[in-house]
Amino acid sequence: MTESIIDLQNISVVFNKEKQQLKAVNDINLRIDRGDIYGIIGYSGAGKSTLVRVINLLQRPTVGKVIVDGTNLLTLPSKKLRTVRKKIGMIFQHFNLMNSRTVFNNVEYPLLHEKISKVERQKRVQRLLELVGLNEFAGAYPEQLSGGQKQRVAIARALASQPDILISDEATSALDPKTTESILKLLRRLNHELGLTIVLITHEMNVIKSICHNVAVIEDGEIIERGSVKDIFTKPKKELTRDFVDTSTNVKKALLQIKWDTQVNSLGGNQRLVQLNFIGGSSKQSLISELARDYHVDANILYANVDQIDGTSIGYMITIFTGATEALDESVEILERNGVEVVPINLDQIKGDEEQW
Amino acid sequence: MVNLIPNVVNMKQQLIDATWATLYMTITSAIIAGILGLGIGLVLIITQPNGILEDRIIYSFTDKVVNILRSVPFIILLAVIAPLTQYLIGTTVGTTAAIVPLIFGIFPFYARQVQNALLEIDPGVIEAAQAMGSSPIEIIFSVYLREGLSDIIRVSTFTLISLVGLTTVAGAIGSGGLGDVAITIGYARFENDVTIVAMMIILALIFTFQIIGDQLAQKFKQF
Ligand SMILES: Nc1ncnc2c1ncn2[C@@H]1O[C@H](COP(=O)(O)OP(=O)(O)OP(=O)(O)O)[C@@H](O)[C@H]1O
Ligand SMILES: [Mg+2]
């Protein structure tokens, strides 16, 4: 059994806003395993930041228990708490670097009050700058750097105290897609090489897709769905989750286009419009030809896409099956038995953002 | 030259003494009010809502005291504070006696200036420091006072210049200094050239402070 390094129990955070109470986090339980890359996704205001700020007690929960690495943080005196915080690195959307300090001094900052010699300290900063690929910028000031470079400095700084956990609060939200990819690659490497546990907040499913192993979907202060990224991508249960998934896999775009297709709008009684999700890319596609051969069910594939998710290929397909009713039922059963998620598509429910008046 | 400023020539020594008196009042009260104002500005920042040592009671008390002291006109403060000056200095007239009201006249103003300068620091940077396990003391010295240093120098310069202005008002209680000379000699005896020269010395002081302050502020933006 893997041991959980973060264990949030029954966490609620209530803010008092001019006599009005706002429940930003509502009775959340969350366990994160050591070495995991755990994604937390949700729309703006869902309570993501509030929830992760509970992990290092930047936000004290109104109710609940915060256990990090076996220690109950809420019972710690402030000095001990600060020692624990050094083991939980944090990076932010707006980098939060100190503008008056050079890149070198920013990374050095968390070590200034540590009991290590100046020589040792400077060596460590040098190594960290190498790790994030910024040696030649040691003497530069933050304002002279690009967003991606600033985030690298922030990552180096967060790693200075050799933390076990890294919390990333929308660290790539202010960056372009290419820079985002390079930062995510760096995080993945740190997870791999240092065994760093990463908790990553985002509102982009693509970020989850490219580096997380597990994910929790949060809405109105509650986790509405959670699981391995593979499962969430193939078998989303909640509307919001499906929305996030469809947006990132382009299935949604395809559905919107298909909606106006005449053959889709004039389906016969012997036809069914379905979406197929399956793990393992091409292997499952042979199933379709099997259906045609053994059950005389024809598949008219309107859209197909294979995505790399957490190192696994996941396929998406939108097809119209044509065949006898019994054969259709049987086909669905066979597909499901083979691990293919079959989702009937209801055209009336397909709405683009522009259509939600 | 001599004809242009007939009275000044006769009073050269008096003007030099007055300049020293002005500098003495300005610098002594600047140091004491500076320490007080900086401390109180910091108290306001760290105890403010969501501050690093949030404390509603201390914050609102300090905030109110600063507001009240700031609303008393200086000329009235001079009179009101006289008993305290008498107690502390042993007299209410003269250059040293003027320092007490000057301190009370300027430190609340400076505290507000410091507070505003520190409010400019991105709260995200403070949060990052907290996340890194910095103690409140470390945050005050290594983040607030360092990140805010350039702005603190800027508002200190501004405050210092206002303080020079206040020293001239203190001339009303016989503080000595350039303001006193300009009024009691230049104005009262119709020796206009004395008034003008006193004013020019004051302007020279102010410009000097401004230039040095601007340069220091620039230098400490990044260091
Ligand atoms: N310190 C605070 N005081 C009062 N209300 C707060 C505070 N912090 C957050 N909130 C409120 O709590 C709710 C959740 O905020 P939170 O910042 O956790 O959302 P989020 O999911 O991180 O959103 P975003 O994606 O915009 O960062 C919001 O309604 C927000 O206004
Ligand atoms: Mg947030």
Image: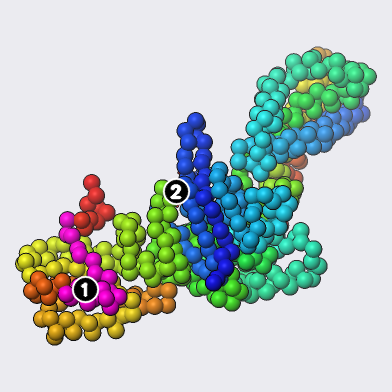
- For the point 76% across and 18% down, the residue is B77
SS at circle 1: helix
- Disc 2 under 8 Å from ligand 1? The reply is yes
In magenta, the rendered stretch is A330-348
- For the point 30% across and 64% down, the residue is A246
Q: Is residue A226 visible?
A: yes
- For the point 65% across and 71% down, the residue is A128
Which percent across, then down, holds residue A70? 63, 61
- Disc 1 under 8 Å from ligand 1? The reply is no
Which percent across, then down, holds residue B101? 80, 23
Horizontal side of B164 relative to A181 (left or right) equals: right
Examine the rendered structure and indicate whether residue A326 appears above or below residue A86.
Answer: below
In the rendered structure, which amino acid carries the disc numbered 2?
A: Gly
State the image quarter where residue A287 is shown: bottom left
- For the point 49% across and 30% down, the residue is A19
State the image quarter where residue A263 is shown: bottom left
Instruction: Give the residue at mark 2.
Output: A221
